[in-house]
Image (tube, rainbow, N blue to C red):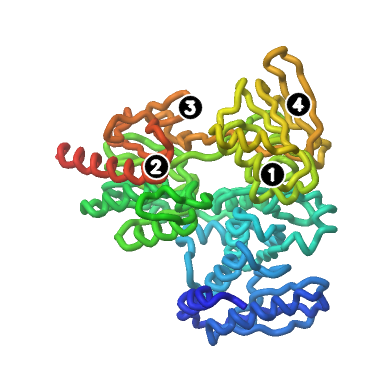
């Protein structure tokens, strides 16, 4: 039975459903079918427009498809979408009902222009925090496209398939038995990947469709700094827009937040939802699922997007944050999802009883090693420097674990694989220059963050690490361009600091506009 709080939330979310939504499940003797039907009963209580019924097909596992007005939508689930995937189930219902968060028309056109027929399956784990992003994106695309089907598959029900397909990480997107994507990815990256894989129908775009207009302030980046900058800008009466690959940025992936002053505890997705709600309360133009291609710094700054669209602005604020840093060694990219991973919480369970490496001796690396030690048979931590950089309390805890070993002064050289999966790691002992190979089943990369400044590095001055250099008011080296948050040289990459910096830079930009009049 679903909790009463969830029931009330669903009733609110489903109150505007106008179409008939049904879940058509396959006949099955699996014992978990009863649990699935109980979930259907609860969800159906949330709206008179929702029902469920048995179809004509049978399956060894609980399986169902979402229908709208007696027609299949292309969205299916194998397993019971509980855990993190319950949200994907609810979002799918809202999407087919024309409710919830739907991309703007330009993004919808890109989805419809994918060359069909497309048939995809995504293998997930109900404990994976990154899987819902992929499942929800592909569910939406399949419904919008019309010649596209997508099935979420709980790997717990299909262990033989997992082994046959050699899946070692989630989410794993499969087409015709072949892996086309594995691991964390945002909506626009996934759409771009599908465009390259399947191709697109050639559609001539008119210039007026690509011109997104002229604004007083455009903010690139939808995290805490971007949200704060947008709200402070629009409150000053400035015509404001936000361009973002995905709203929330890295915060979306943050689990527990206990140091946002006045908020004792929250979690990343909840904070992102609140930021989005706050933004939506103002006349701020939000252009999500966009990636910037180029910035031209004229009197009116022109921002060209990879979609072919462009937007102009008097003032530009960069708040693009940072992303996970990669090793950039041979074998890393080739074996992502097949032994190379970045999320110990998501992919750790796939290495139960196996031997893995964690590359990185900072706080994130040591925390990952501690977590993995409770799952896997053996963990080897690799650190480039002579000593671990993590906090002493974490290092002390790590050293008490009997199945963890530490290798310092190590330069990772190559991820080794057999063509199907990771089988080891080659590294250099920096003391004596000896090259050493170690047998492993997986490599978790935890070496920090890389500023998302590549698109602007030729326009503004950056450090050798890619951080945008700013003054005490967030001004960059280019007139009319400002920056705030983790993408800049500001010390201490914290949510509360990013919010403050976003507010400060918006006020500085407003002040500078007044002085230039």
Secondary structure state at the residue bearing disc 3: loop
Would you name the residue on which mark 2 appears?
Answer: 319
Which quarter shows the N terminus?
A: bottom right
Label 3 with label 2: CB-CB less than 8 Å: no
* Observer-nearest of 327 and 207: 327
Select label 1 or label 2 by which is in front. Answer: 1
Q: CA distance from mark 4 to mark 1?
A: 21 Å
Dot 2 crowding, Cα within 10 Å, few <14, some 14–19, many 20+: many
Select label 3 or label 1 by which is in front. Answer: 1
Tell me what residue is drawn at x 35 percent, y 37 percent: 483
Mark sitting earlier along the chain (4/2): 2
Secondary structure state at the residue bearing disc 4: strand
* Observer-nearest of 32 and 277: 32
Q: CA distance from mark 3 to mark 1?
A: 29 Å
Would you name the residue on which mark 1 appears?
Answer: 372
Mark sitting earlier along the chain (3/4): 4
Label 3 with label 1: CB-CB less than 8 Å: no
Would you name the residue on which mark 3 appears?
Answer: 465
Q: How many marks?
A: 4
Secondary structure state at the residue bearing disc 2: loop
């Amino acid at each position: 039975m679903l909790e009463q709080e969830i029931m009330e939330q669903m009733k609110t979310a489903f109150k505007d459903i106008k179409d008939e939504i049904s879940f058509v499940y396959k006949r099955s003797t699996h014992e978990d079918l009863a649990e699935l039907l109980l979930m259907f009963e609860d969800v159906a209580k949330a709206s008179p427009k929702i029902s469920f019924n048995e179809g004509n097909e049978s399956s060894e596992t609980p399986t169902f498809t979402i229908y709208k007005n007696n027609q299949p939508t292309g969205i299916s689930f194998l397993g019971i979408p509980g855990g993190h995937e319950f949200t994907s189930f609810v979002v799918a219902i809202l999407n087919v009902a024309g409710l919830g968060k739907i991309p703007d028309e330009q993004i919808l056109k890109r989805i419809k222009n994918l060359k069909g027929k497309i048939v995809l399956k995504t293998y997930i784990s109900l404990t994976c925090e990154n899987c819902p992003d992929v499942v929800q994106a592909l569910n939406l695309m399949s419904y919008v496209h019309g010649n596209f089907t997508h099935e979420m598959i709980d790997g717990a029900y299909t262990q033989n398939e997992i082994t046959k397909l050699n899946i070692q990480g989630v989410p794993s997107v499969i087409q015709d038995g072949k892996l086309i994507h594995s691991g964390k990815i945002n909506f626009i990256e996934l759409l771009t990947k599908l465009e390259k894989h399947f191709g697109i129908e050639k559609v001539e775009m008119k210039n007026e469709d690509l011109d997104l207009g002229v604004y007083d302030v455009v903010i690139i980046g939808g995290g805490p700094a971007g949200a704060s900058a947008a709200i402070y800008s629009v409150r000053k009466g400035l015509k404001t827009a936000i361009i973002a690959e995905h709203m929330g940025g890295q915060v979306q992936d943050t689990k527990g937040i206990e140091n946002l002053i006045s908020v004792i505890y929250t979690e990343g997705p909840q904070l992102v939802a609140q930021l989005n709600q706050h933004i939506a309360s103002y006349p701020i133009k939000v252009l999500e699922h966009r990636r910037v291609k180029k910035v031209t710094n004229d009197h009116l700054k022109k921002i060209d997007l990879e979609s072919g669209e462009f937007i102009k602005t008097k003032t530009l604020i960069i708040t693009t944050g940072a992303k996970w840093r990669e090793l950039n060694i041979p074998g890393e990219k080739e074996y992502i999802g097949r032994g190379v991973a970045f999320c110990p919480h998501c992919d750790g369970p796939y290495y139960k009883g196996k031997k893995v490496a964690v590359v990185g001796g900072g706080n994130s690396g040591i925390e990952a090693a501690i977590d993995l030690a409770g799952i896997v048979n053996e963990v080897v931590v690799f650190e480039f420097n002579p000593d671990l950089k993590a906090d002493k309390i974490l290092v002390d805890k790590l050293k008490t674990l009997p199945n963890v070993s530490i290798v310092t002064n190590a330069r990772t050289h190559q991820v080794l694989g057999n063509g199907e999966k990771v089988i080891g790691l080659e590294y250099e002992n920096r003391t004596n220059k000896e090259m050493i190979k170690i047998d492993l089943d997986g490599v978790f990369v935890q070496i920090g963050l890389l500023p998302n400044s590549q698109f602007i590095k030729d326009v503004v001055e950056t450090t050798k690490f890619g951080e945008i250099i700013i003054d005490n008011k967030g001004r960059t080296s280019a007139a009319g361009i400002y920056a705030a948050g983790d993408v800049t040289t500001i010390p201490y990459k914290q949510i509360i600091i990013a919010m403050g910096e976003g507010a400060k830079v918006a006020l500085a930009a407003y002040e500078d506009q007044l002085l230039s009049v």
